[in-house]
Amino acid sequence: MTKRPLRPFIRVLSILIACLLISTVASANIELFKHSPVPGGIAVVPLAMSGDTKPTVSFNKKTVAVMQRGNDWVAVVGIPLSTKAGDHSLAVTRGDISRDIMFSVRPHEYAEQRIKIKNKRKVDPLPFDMDRINAEKARVAEVRTIHTDGALERPFVWPVKGIISSPFGLRRFFNDKPRRPHGGIDIAANEGVPIVAPADGVVVETGDYFFNGNCVFIEHGSGLITFYAHMSRIDVAIGDKVTAGEMIGAIGATGRVTGPHLHWSVGLNGTWIDPMLFVAE
Ligand SMILES: [Zn+2]
């Protein structure tokens, strides 16, 4: 009975601590997103708005991550590899106010890569394969729009240690045919080596895809998505919560590959950006 008067005090104290934790996390998060305004990079764009209400921002009609830096709101924009250098605009709304905010993208030249694939069907799929490929494309487009409230708290840990055999952004030719640029990095490792989650998140998709083989998608908050392909084994299921360093599967050579490796992609506002922006050096 004598303890009862203390309860409201404890409740207030715990709310204060929670607020303090949230604000600490919010200010730490934004520093993990490095302003690197090139195609395949990130633009950190001040919105000239403060206050408690978070503005809504979109780029190319896709929802963009919005975070607090000090008292001000900033947009953290993933820039598609196909973006032209020059000025681009974000659509910003809060309450009744709508405005466009401009940001600049600098040019960046990525190298070219030519790969020989023995399985010709993985370069020029059969009409029969196209149904499966198109269904997978639609599923990935859906997964890439998942955007929860959380945000990254710490730099990524490497999902696997190994030599980067192919960097992000390469303009690729398979058997001399131009294909989409490389939307991730390839890390060479032996079949069966464990792959771990680089940060806390939720598994939003797993599957055996035509090009990607066994693959996993994780959302880490604010629409930050990581993607793992060509796995020999998947150890997680859709809806699983994972923590940084937790095993999600193993290195393999499934899908369109020339040998065992991890293809690792990082997405923001539905577009693939350079994973190297997120790992501690
Ligand atoms: Zn790759």
Image: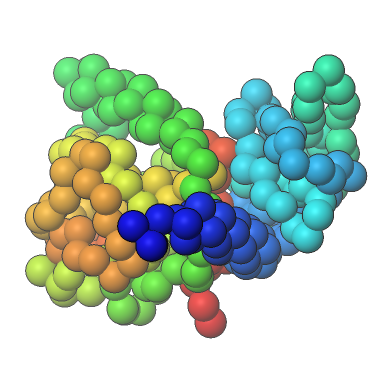
Give the percent coordinates (x, y) of residue 164: 39, 73
The residue shown at (35%, 79%) is 163
Q: Is residue 152 above or below residue 120?
A: below
Frontmost residue, 32 versus 195: 32
Is 67 on the left-hand or right-hand side of 194?
A: right
The colour scheme applied to this rendered structure is rainbow
Give the percent coordinates (x, y) of residue 117: 26, 51
Q: Is residue 169 above or below residue 54?
A: below
For residue 25, say whether it is visible. no
In terms of image quadrants, where is residue 269?
A: top right
The residue shown at (38%, 32%) is 143
Give the percent coordinates (x, y) of residue 24: 62, 66
The residue shown at (10%, 69%) is 192
Frontmost residue, 258 versus 41: 41
For residue 225, say whether it is visible. yes
Frontmost residue, 134 versus 238: 238
Q: Is residue 218 above or below residue 95?
A: below
Is 126 on the left-hand or right-hand side of 68?
A: left
Frontmost residue, 278 versus 115: 278
In the picture as drawn, the residue positioned furthest to the front comes out as: 2
The residue shown at (47%, 57%) is 5
Q: Is residue 162 above or below residue 177?
A: below
Is 211 on the left-hand or right-hand side of 55?
A: left
Give the percent coordinates (x, y) of residue 15: 54, 54
